[in-house]
Amino acid sequence: MESHGRDELKGPVLHIVVVGFHHKKGCQVEFSYPPLMPDEGHDSHLLPEEWKYLPFLALPDGAHNFQEDTVYFHLPPLNEDMKCVYGVSCYRQIEAKALKVRQADVTRETVQKSVCVLSRVPLYGLLQAKLQLITHAYFEEKDFSQISILKELYDHMNGSLRGSALEGSQMYLGLSPRDLILHFRHKVLILFKLILLEKKVLFYVSPVNRLVGALMTVLSLFPGMIEHGLADSSHYRPQSSVSEDPTLLESVSGAEDFVSVSVTDFADGELELAGAAAEPEPGDRRRHLLKPPPPRVSPESSESEWETLDPAVLDEGPQEAAAEGGETEPLLDAFDSEPATPITVQPQSAGGQGGVVQGLVSGLEEDRYGLPLPVFTKGYLCLPYMALQQHHLLSDVTVRGFVAGATNILFRQQRHLSDAVVEVEEAGVHVQDPELRKTLSLTTADLRFADYLVKHVTENRDDVFLDGTGWEGGDEWIRAQFTLYLHSLLSSVLQQDNERLLADYGVPFVTAWKITHNYRVWYSNKHPAMAAITPGHPFQGQYSVADVKLRLSHSVQNSERGKKIGNAMMTTSRSVVQTGKAVGQSVGGALTSAKSAMSSWFSTLAPPPAVTTAEHPEPSAEVQP
């Protein structure tokens, strides 16, 4: 607690750093305030060993293709008293001929630099907003030796970001779940479940600001995750020390005891979870941990072509689970709520949650519900942006999983190193393992929940001035719905005879989730506040015709087969329309010509027409074209 107090006195910002691209040395630190190395000057290029990747994170790969960009990145702590260091970098480039003072090492036509803020607190959007203004002013000087503005930035940020500025919605500035749902639609819930399962998830898109925005917005759906859940998310070592340090396994807090396992391992009985039904005592916690499985080589399917997650292979939900037990009728009676009247959550102030306390097992600051879940602990990394120099982390034995972002295509080509690749541009979630695809399949209740979110976000978007300003369908409302979803899931697992309640979340998913580190840590502690949460899926209820339509629509829109059928139907319909127009024009033109020819021929043979009444129209008037 004393170290925390000293941090408050020092302020949330650790350093202001300028990173430039040297034509011979590559990316390097050109300025730091205060100096990154205490015994060096502000212009020293030296870095702590733990932060050796800082220049490559701040000046991202392929940055020369963009005039400006923004990067969020995480750095490991320098000592035991520190937590994750949150970095925000604003990149710009300027033509060398526009500089007022051109230094001797400027030999290229353009100058590329990034201004970075290294912070103790995850204020990504707020730091970005302030940093973009300063970066613009710094480049407008056209003289990069003018560093006074950077020192003023350090003092200003530490003065303005203390105390109340670190609370409330400022944590989520620039992270819009509304835009995320408009882009990914129902797949947002699949991403939510992927992270709950602690899988190796790689986000891919360019430029970096789109990448880190999408990744961090997904994490903001987890209650308390941005504020308190990322403190241990960057505990890794540089590549040079991985194979040389025999104490590395101990340095990542017992990562050998917490391994990533697949559903097939659990189903085959290779791993056992002792005392899963009983709540373990704190002193006896290690007996409830999973034993490491024997080492396995990469599966043969790693070289096969990846498949897009196919929601057509969907779990039948509670009805199938009940049919296996021969209790179909009681199942239908157990769900009284109608799908049309879902349970929704209303806004709740942060103060109403009773504050946060230090978790005994997780080590994170938790609320009275035990949230955030300790996902990013014990070697599970969160790296919003990964430089190419960090590629070894994907296969590091001390890293049991990750949620990472990359812009280099080499990351995407190493398919066997990730469980899922999220193509942000195409809103695609590509999963290699068929078992994992089945585990992530959305149940009917999940589809109702996702459809409920999509409808509230997409409707009433005609007024551009009022769009997103209301409660329902807004960013905070969406986060509240995911909070309710997670609260209900946690409450359901605490109930006796909860098979029917959990079936709405998917039996394969719940089975896989129960062997994750975050579930076991949460379940090992008591959370009395959970007694006030209603168990069961928020969108549980009897099945209807609307559910059949929803499942069919979801399958057609998201499965590979459905997409191929849809594209074929669109192509066929366009061809039919175009052919019909061509045939219609040719046939219509021929008939018109024939009609005019016949009319002129009859006019030469027939006598002058007599005046007739309406009861006897002319024969030529009856000729149809």
Image (tube, rainbow, N blue to C red):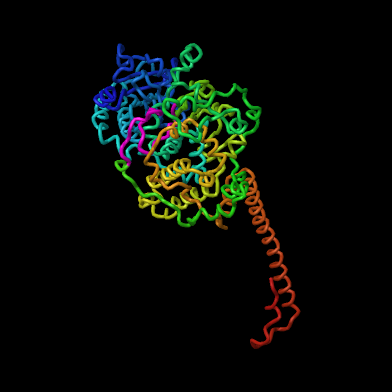
Residue 138: x and y in percent read 31, 27
Q: Nearer the viewer, residue 296 or 149?
A: 296
Of residues 330 and 335, which is closer to you in this image? 330
Q: Quadrant of the N terminus?
A: top left
Q: Which residues are magenta?
A: 353-377
Can residue 474 be found in the magenta stretch? Answer: no
- Residue 432, position in %: x, y? 60, 34
Left or right relative to 366: residue 335: right
- Which secondary structure is most common in the magenta stretch? loop
Query: Which residue is rendered at x = 39% and y = 38% of the image?
Result: 527
The residue lying at 74 percent from left, 74 percent from top is: 601
**Residue 360 forms part of the magenta stretch:** yes
Residue 485, by quadrant, is top left
How far across and how far down the image is residue 321, in percent?
Answer: 59, 46
The image quadrant that residue 372 belongs to is top left
Q: Is residue 150 positioned above or below 489 on the image?
A: above
- Nearest to the observer: residue 469 or residue 398: 398
Asked if one can make out residue 83 in the rendered structure from this viewpoint, the answer is yes
Could you tell me which quadrant the C terminus lies in? bottom right
Left or right for 248, reference 507 = left
Q: Classify 270 as above or below 588.
A: above
Q: Position of residue 622 (x, y in %)?
A: 69, 78
Question: Residue placed at 67% from the left, 61% from the top?
Answer: 585
Q: Is residue 92 visible?
A: no
